[in-house]
Amino acid sequence: GAVVSQHPSRVICKSGTSVKIECRSLDFQATTMFWYRQFPKQSLMLMATSNEGSKATYEQGVEKDKFLINHASLTLSTLTVTSAHPEDSSFYICSARDREGSSYGYTFGSGTRLTVV
Amino acid sequence: GNSVTQMEGPVTLSEEAFLTINCTYTATGYPSLFWYVQYPGEGLQLLLKATKADDKGSNKGFEATYRKETTSFHLEKGSVQVSDSAVYFCALTHNSGGSNYKLTFGKGTLLTVNP
């Protein structure tokens, strides 16, 4: 089946630095990539939606200059958390919707646990 | 707008017990409905889905039927196992107003199955 590889799975960074999270669709073309943030014991909060080759669409309340999303190809999307602060610590998950909207539907990455110290 | 309401739990059952997690939705038209499962520290995995009214999704002993008349998609399993312990999310997608088919999730239900 469809697989989305998300890296890193865990990252610890110092306050003020930037962190890049990658999601790759391994055996299908992801026309749309969704980025979520999940707080402990809570549901997923959609941060932004990106389509290959175009600018991401951010949800209300999400700072686009802080959470930079790039979807340069049909198999790779990245989320960069810039000037990270402790309040950015969270679990980030990507999800890819495949090109034809086939039975694969939406495939999720395994998530990235970001801790900012 | 679209919304999903699911039983929040937590739900604690003994092994081999019957499971029901309720899910109702609000959406215009005919959304597609999903159940996802999340094991600790991991991303989400698709458990089952249904794309039109009266469809039944099933997988690994879990079932859910798309009921348009009651706008529901309740998850059931006849006999749960310890390995079913996880968080379960009900979700829908609908390309209304150019929403890009983004998923709308319920709040999740933590299921713990004891031996």
Image: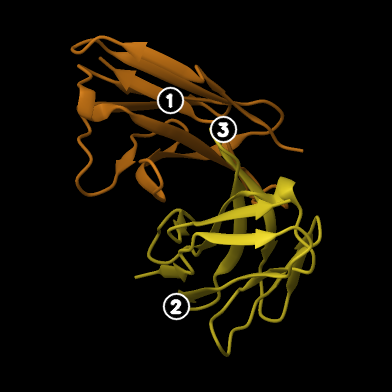
Task: State the hue of chain A.
Answer: orange
Q: Which residue is mark 2?
A: B28
Figure coloring: by chain
Query: Where, by quadrant of the figure, is residue A14 drawn?
Result: top left
Mark 3 and mark 2 in contact (Cβ < 8 Å)? no
x then y, percent, for residue B50: 68, 67
B18, above or below B70, in the image: above
**Which amino acid type is shown beneath numbered disc 2?**
Thr
Q: Name the subunit of mark 3.
A: A
Disc sitting over residue A113 in the figure: 1
**Which amino acid type is shown beneath numbered disc 3?**
Gly
Task: State the hue of chain B.
Answer: yellow
Q: CA distance from mark 2 to mark 1?
A: 35 Å
Residue B93 placement, left or right of B84: left
Q: Which residue is mark 3?
A: A109
- At horizontal 75% and vertical 72% (from top left) the residue drawn is B56
Task: Check disc 2 and report its element: helix, strand or loop.
Answer: loop
